[in-house]
């Protein structure tokens, strides 16, 4: 690797680590905790690559991207940020950052991206206005998360939002599919045009499709839960899509069913499936991003307080229980539960018993998806692993994947087995076919909380 890299981050440890790694790789490095200093270096012609944090003591790193582009067209900028929301990824894409990585980042991955940035001559910036800021509505979207699957999702949304491809958004109920569609529209070039949500009733009658197109006016059309549409409604959509002219709207659809499986079973039109699936965005369930649950719970507490609700915070034991719950209703169920806790908790700190009361009458388990019924375990696991690779957008996942995947599977397996055996570790070890001492070690290593458990029926 050859070139000069400008590093801007208010964290001294990160500056030191990046300086040492880049220097060992053969680069010259200038590091600073000030955006003012960074801009001075850029204007002086220093640097072949910029690596910048977003939240800095003297400003916002994203707001410097247009200034950097104006001063040094073609100078690549890699944005790193602990503000891990879809809005950060979208703003970085809108401001034409070369790349975006969430903190904590994988150092070898960042080094590979830096090497590519130094090797590839960036094209001249377009005339698109980069002055895009998160609206208050956008800032309220519960599309936040630090897990790898959510960060990959953010990057995918940022890449496709200004393409002409149809977008099929899949995921379980309550994961935020409609919010993803709205974000694609609100941060795209079509954001000043209408966003139309279409139901089967809107397509009825001879003039239904033409009326929908007239309302859209070149904006975005969302077919919500397209798998629920009748055969007649599906046929009308196909004919409508085939009649699109020059001022065609952006087409999006959501589905909590496996449309490909339904198509293979003859329950969904093949021609409609391929018209809607220009790019597929699969929104993960909360079970697939458990580490985001505390972050989301705190987000909903802040939102409730902003709406005039009492100030509340989770006790450690309460938050542990929130994190351990299966949340079959996903983000929507979590938000409803948190709002209820805000008003039913007796004190400022929400206790574990209060969480147990709220969750007591709610289901803990539901089928994954109707399209997964009868599916072999290996096929289901393979589908999730393929999606994990696909969400990285052509970039390999961070190293250590084998052990990371085993840990992801092993933890839930042991927890479910403990539930099934009522917390009896001897029976659990026998069920799993491992030594009891091995089970105890795994419980410790995986930090599995052992309590009196409900035996599954």
Image: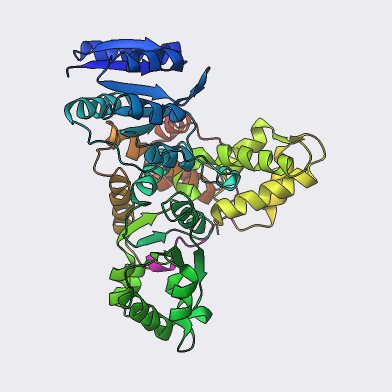
Q: How many marks?
A: 0
Q: Is residue 215 above or below residue 94?
A: below
Name the colour scheme: rainbow
- Nearest the camera: 150 or 355? 150
Residue 271 visible from this viewpoint: yes
Give the residue at x 28% y 69%: 274
Figure quadrant of the C terminus: bottom right
Residue 1: x percent and y percent?
17, 19
Q: Is residue 418 above or below residue 329?
A: above
Side of 195 relative to 270 (left or right): right
Image-quadrant location for residue 453: top right
Q: Is residue 201 above or below residue 41?
A: below
Furthest-right residue in this view? 346
Q: What secondary structure prevails in the magenta region?
A: loop
Image-quadrant location for residue 115: top left
- Nearest the camera: 144 or 114? 114
Furthest-bottom residue in this view? 206
Residues in magenta? Answer: 364-373
- Nearest the camera: 138 or 400? 138
Residue 105 visible from this viewpoint: no
Give the residue at x 34% y 74%: 241
Give the residue at x 60% y 44%: 136
């Amino acid at each position: 690797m050859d070139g000069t890299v400008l590093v801007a981050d208010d964290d001294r440890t990160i500056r030191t680590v990046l300086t040492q790694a880049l220097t060992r790789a053969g680069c010259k490095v200038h590091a600073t905790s000030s955006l003012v200093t960074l801009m001075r270096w850029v204007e002086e012609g220093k640097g072949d690559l910029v690596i910048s944090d977003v939240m800095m003591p003297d400003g916002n790193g994203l707001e410097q991207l247009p200034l950097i582009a104006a001063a040094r067209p073609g100078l690549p900028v890699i944005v790193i940020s602990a503000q891990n929301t879809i809005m950060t990824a979208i703003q970085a894409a809108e401001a034409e950052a070369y790349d975006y990585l969430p903190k904590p980042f994988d150092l070898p991955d960042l080094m590979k991206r830096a090497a590519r940035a130094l090797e590839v001559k960036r094209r001249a910036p377009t005339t698109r206005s980069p002055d895009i800021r998160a609206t208050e509505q956008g800032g309220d979207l519960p599309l936040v998360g630090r897990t790898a699957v959510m960060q990959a999702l953010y990057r995918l949304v940022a890449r496709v939002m200004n393409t002409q491809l149809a977008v099929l958004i899949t995921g379980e109920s309550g994961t935020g599919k409609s919010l993803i569609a709205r974000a694609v529209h609100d941060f795209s070039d079509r954001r000043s045009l209408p966003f139309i949500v279409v139901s089967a009733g809107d397509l009825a009658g001879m003039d239904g499709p033409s009326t929908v197109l007239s309302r859209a006016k070149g904006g975005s059309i969302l077919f919500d839960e397209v798998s629920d549409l009748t055969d007649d409604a599906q046929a009308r959509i196909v004919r409508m899509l085939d009649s699109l002219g020059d001022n065609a709207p952006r087409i999006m659809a959501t589905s909590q069913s496996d449309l490909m499986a339904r198509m293979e079973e003859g329950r969904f039109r093949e021609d409609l499936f391929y018209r809607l699936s220009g790019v597929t965005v699969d929104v993960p369930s909360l079970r697939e991003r458990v580490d985001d649950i505390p972050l989301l719970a705190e987000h909903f507490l802040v939102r409730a307080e902003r709406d005039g609700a009492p100030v509340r915070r989770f006790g450690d034991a309460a938050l542990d229980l929130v994190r351990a719950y299966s949340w079959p209703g996903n983000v929507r169920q979590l938000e409803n539960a948190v709002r209820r806790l805000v008003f039913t908790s007796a004190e400022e700190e929400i206790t574990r018993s209060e969480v147990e009361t709220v969750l007591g009458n709610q289901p803990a388990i539901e089928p994954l998806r109707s399209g997964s019924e009868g599916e072999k375990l290996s096929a289901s696991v393979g589908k999730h692993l393929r999606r994990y690779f696909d969400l990285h957008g052509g970039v390999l996942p961070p190293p250590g994947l084998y052990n990371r995947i085993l840990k992801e599977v092993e933890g839930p397996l042991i927890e479910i087995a403990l539930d099934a055996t009522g917390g009896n570790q001897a029976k659990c070890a026998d069920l799993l076919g491992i030594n009891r001492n091995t089970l105890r070690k795994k419980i410790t290593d995986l930090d599995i909380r052992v309590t009196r458990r409900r035996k599954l029926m």
